[in-house]
Image (cartoon, grey):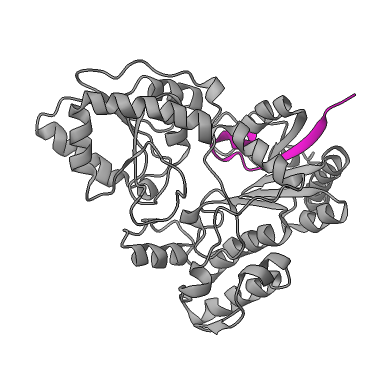
């Protein structure tokens, strides 16, 4: 008798699709995994189907104009073949960043066929710059420096809201994080950047002299790398004894070995929270530094994160101190591995997800309120977009239970 199947796709952000494919069989499930494209060369992306590659295999023939006209039909055929296969084989669908069909038509189709849908929001898929900017200003944080490549337009807003509200409307279970939920409406469970602790062995003991400090940004401007590098250059000029390694464009398996053999890992200084870098480093028993804002930002209810809380203003003093405090480094190292095993491991996510899908009623980790209570639209043109997508979910039971009706700053709830 074959195992039950769970579909996991469609972007392998931080190798979470690949990791779940490997771990789900421990719970009696096979995984059918697919992505639109490989996310980055540094990630493993060990999935069953790369949909973009299949679409590019369309044969060209003469006359060329006929071939060109037929190519969109081939693209739609590839999409439909995948969704039909998944409908036939899978009962649960877990989505990261995208769904299968381009306009999310698959969500209604899945619901009609009685499938369970899980959305894991993971960052800029649902984080909108102007929402984050306002919230960070409210808490006194520096805003994230996205730069000129970010789409600040109403079109960019629509792309973000379209995905967010579709997830809120159709998901049976929703996982997200406070630092990306500024324009969210639906209550959700905490999404940790998960790690397979069984695949990462603890690293060596902390070095007594010349500790190795590692920073591995996926995007320098978002991670606050300029502040990291400025401080490291300052400490070097002062004669502080350490070795610095900047890790970029390195395959994941090689990067993990670098993390394991380091002493101190620097994650991010702007967005409060941690990424996959922190999870892997905690699993390896490393000292992790990241912006957490424990005293001000209510993102960690009931959790004692073994991460040194830093921001651009405090990073210099705290890094200098931890480099010279071997005993404190050893304490953080021991706590980090334990925390990864007890909180961050994929197996806790899978157990929680399956329990909720089976009918267990668990209290939400977060009930978002910033959009309803404080957010002000950035332009007159954007107001219509916000209201359009609020209306899309206004009939949902969770909306009626958690969102107070009314009008504020031209936003209609």
Q: Which residues are magenta?
A: 1-17
Asked which quadrant contains residue 160, the reply is bottom right
Q: Residue at x 56, y 40 (%)?
A: 13
| Towards the viewer: 202 or 14 | 202
Is residue 379 visible in this depiction of the protein?
yes
> Residue 392 location in percent, x, y?
70, 71
Q: Residue at x 18, y 35 (%)?
A: 320
Compared to residue 204, the image places residue 20 above or below, namely: below
Task: Quadrant for the C terminus, please.
Answer: bottom right
Assess whether residue 396 is covered by the magenta stretch: no
* Left or right: 89 as drawn, with respect to 215: right
* Left or right: 30 as drawn, with respect to 10: right
> Residue 138 location in percent, x, y?
36, 67
Assess whether residue 3 is covered by the magenta stretch: yes
Compared to residue 178, the image places residue 204 above or below, namely: above
* Left or right: 75 as drawn, with respect to 136: right
Task: Quadrant for the N terminus, please.
Answer: top right
| Towards the viewer: 169 or 218 | 169
> Residue 80 location in percent, x, y?
83, 47
Is residue 280 visible in this depiction of the protein?
no
| Towards the viewer: 258 or 2 | 2
Q: Residue furthest left?
A: 238
Q: Residue at x 54, y 63 (%)?
A: 368
């Amino acid at each position: 008798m074959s195992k039950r199947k769970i579909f996991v796709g469609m972007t392998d952000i931080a190798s979470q699709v690949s990791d779940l494919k490997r771990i789900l069989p421990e719970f009696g499930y096979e995984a059918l995994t697919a992505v639109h494209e490989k996310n980055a060369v540094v990630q493993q992306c060990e999935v069953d189907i790369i949909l973009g590659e299949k679409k590019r295999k369309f044969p060209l023939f003469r006359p060329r104009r006929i071939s060109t006209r037929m190519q969109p039909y081939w693209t739609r055929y590839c999409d439909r073949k995948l969704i039909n296969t998944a409908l036939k084989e899978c009962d649960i669908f877990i989505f990261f960043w995208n769904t299968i069909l381009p306009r999310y038509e698959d969500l209604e189709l899945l619901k009609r066929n009685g499938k369970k849908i899980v959305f894991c929001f993971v960052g800029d898929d649902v984080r909108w710059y102007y929402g984050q900017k306002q919230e960070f200003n409210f808490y006194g944080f520096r805003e994230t420096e996205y730069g000129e490549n970010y789409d600040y337009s109403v079109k960019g807003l629509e792309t973000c809201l379209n995905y967010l509200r579709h997830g809120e409307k159709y998901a049976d279970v929703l996982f997200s994080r406070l630092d990306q939920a500024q324009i969210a409406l639906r209550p959700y469970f905490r999404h940790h950047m998960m790690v397979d602790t069984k695949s990462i062995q603890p690293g060596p003991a902390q070095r007594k002299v010349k500790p190795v400090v590692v920073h591995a940004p996926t995007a320098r401007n978002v991670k606050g790398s300029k502040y990291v590098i400025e401080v490291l250059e300052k400490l070097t000029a002062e004669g502080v004894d350490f070795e610095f390694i900047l890790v970029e464009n390195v395959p994941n398996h090689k990067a993990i070995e670098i993390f394991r053999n380091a002493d101190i890992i620097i994650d991010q200084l702007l967005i409060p929270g941690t990424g996959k870098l922190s999870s892997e480093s905690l699993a390896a028993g490393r000292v992790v530094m990241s912006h957490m804002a424990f005293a001000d930002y209510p993102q960690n209810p009931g959790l004692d994160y073994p991460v040194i809380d830093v921001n651009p203003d405090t990073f210099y003093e705290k890094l200098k101190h931890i480099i010279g405090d071997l005993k404190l480094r050893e304490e953080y190292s021991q706590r980090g591995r334990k925390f990864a095993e007890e909180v961050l491991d994929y197996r806790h996510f899978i157990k929680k997800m399956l329990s909720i899908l089976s009918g267990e009623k668990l209290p939400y980790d977060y009930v978002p309120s910033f959009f309803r209570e404080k957010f002000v639209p950035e332009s007159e043109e954007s107001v219509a977009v916000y209201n359009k997508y609020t209306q899309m979910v206004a009939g949902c039971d969770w909306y009626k239970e958690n969102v107070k009706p009314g009008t504020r700053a031209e936003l209609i709830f």
